[in-house]
């Protein structure tokens, strides 16, 4: 049973398409924990998820700056969380993150998820973005399943991407 897949992306478009495929497969209650440095492609990936969830094209998905959480309407609601600016533990309560996670009525995509105590995430899919010295457009995207849904997702992405 594959718990992990590594996919290479050679362009912003490829990352967006990977997000799109992922968004097609996510369901209410799905949690995607995104990590990787500034500019590694987390937001591009979430833009793809939004497309996959049929968020109308007039919504421009960008990292929430002051609000920390943006909600977009789609086939299911998409909650886009960005913890880059979060400074202390208590903020998680203030921004309503626990509420959203326990509500399970939408898909939750969290940038800078490594700022979270991972114990508060039960089942989730972890997606790690890494730069590559070979090219400034190359990204290594590591997807790890923590739970059944992630395993199914990886299985399907493996078929899509023909990764052995
Ligand atoms: N393979 C790639 N995947 C995603 N983004 C890429 C890729 N190659 C270059 N880029 C560029 O990297 C930047 C990624 O930005 P963004 O998604 O906002 O990063 P993050 O949210 O991780 O800080 C964009 O400017 C994008 O055009
Ligand atoms: Mg971002």
Image (cartoon, rainbow, N blue to C red):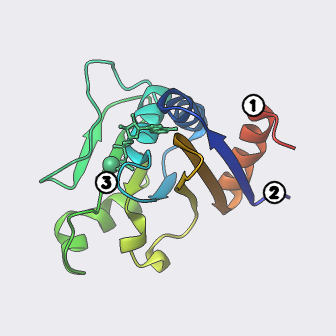
Separation of residues labelled 3 and 1 (CA atoms): 27 Å
Q: Quadrant of the N terminus?
A: bottom right
Q: Position of residue 75 (x, y in %)?
A: 44, 29
Separation of residues labelled 1 and 2 (CA atoms): 15 Å
Residue 118 position (above or below residue 14): below
Which circle marks residue 81 in the picture? 3
Point out the residue furthest to the top here.
57
Quadrant in the picture for residue 106: top left
Disc 3 on helix, strand or loop? strand
Residue 23 position (above or below residue 4): above
Q: Which residue is mark 2?
A: 2
Q: Earlier in the sequence, mark 3 or mark 1?
A: 3
Circles 1 and 2: CB distance less than 8 Å?
no
Quadrant in the picture for residue 87: bottom left
Separation of residues labelled 3 and 2 (CA atoms): 27 Å
Q: In the image, what residue occupies the spot 50% across and 54% down?
A: 32
Say few, some or many: other residues with alpha carbon within 10 Å of mark 2 (under 14 / 14 to 19 / 20 or more). Answer: few
Disc 2 on helix, strand or loop? loop
As drawn, is 65 to the left or to the right of 63? left
How many labels were placed on the picture? 3
């Amino acid at each position: 049973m594959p718990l992990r897949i590594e996919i290479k992306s050679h362009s912003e478009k490829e990352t967006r398409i990977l997000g799109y495929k992922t968004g097609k497969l996510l369901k209410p209650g799905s949690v995607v924990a995104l990590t990787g440095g500034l500019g590694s492609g987390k937001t591009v990936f979430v833009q793809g998820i939004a497309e996959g969830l049929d968020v109308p094209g007039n919504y421009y998905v960008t990292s929430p700056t002051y609000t920390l959480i943006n909600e977009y309407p789609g086939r299911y609601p998409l909650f886009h969380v960005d913890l880059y600016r979060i400074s202390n533990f208590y903020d998680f309560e203030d921004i309503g993150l626990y509420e959203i996670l326990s509500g399970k009525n939408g898909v939750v995509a969290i940038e800078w998820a490594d700022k979270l105590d991972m114990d508060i995430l039960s089942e989730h899919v972890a997606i790690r973005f890494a730069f590559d010295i070979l090219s400034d457009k190359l990204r290594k995207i590591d997807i790890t399943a923590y739970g059944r849904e992630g395993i199914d997702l990886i299985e399907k992405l493996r078929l899509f991407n023909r990764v052995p």
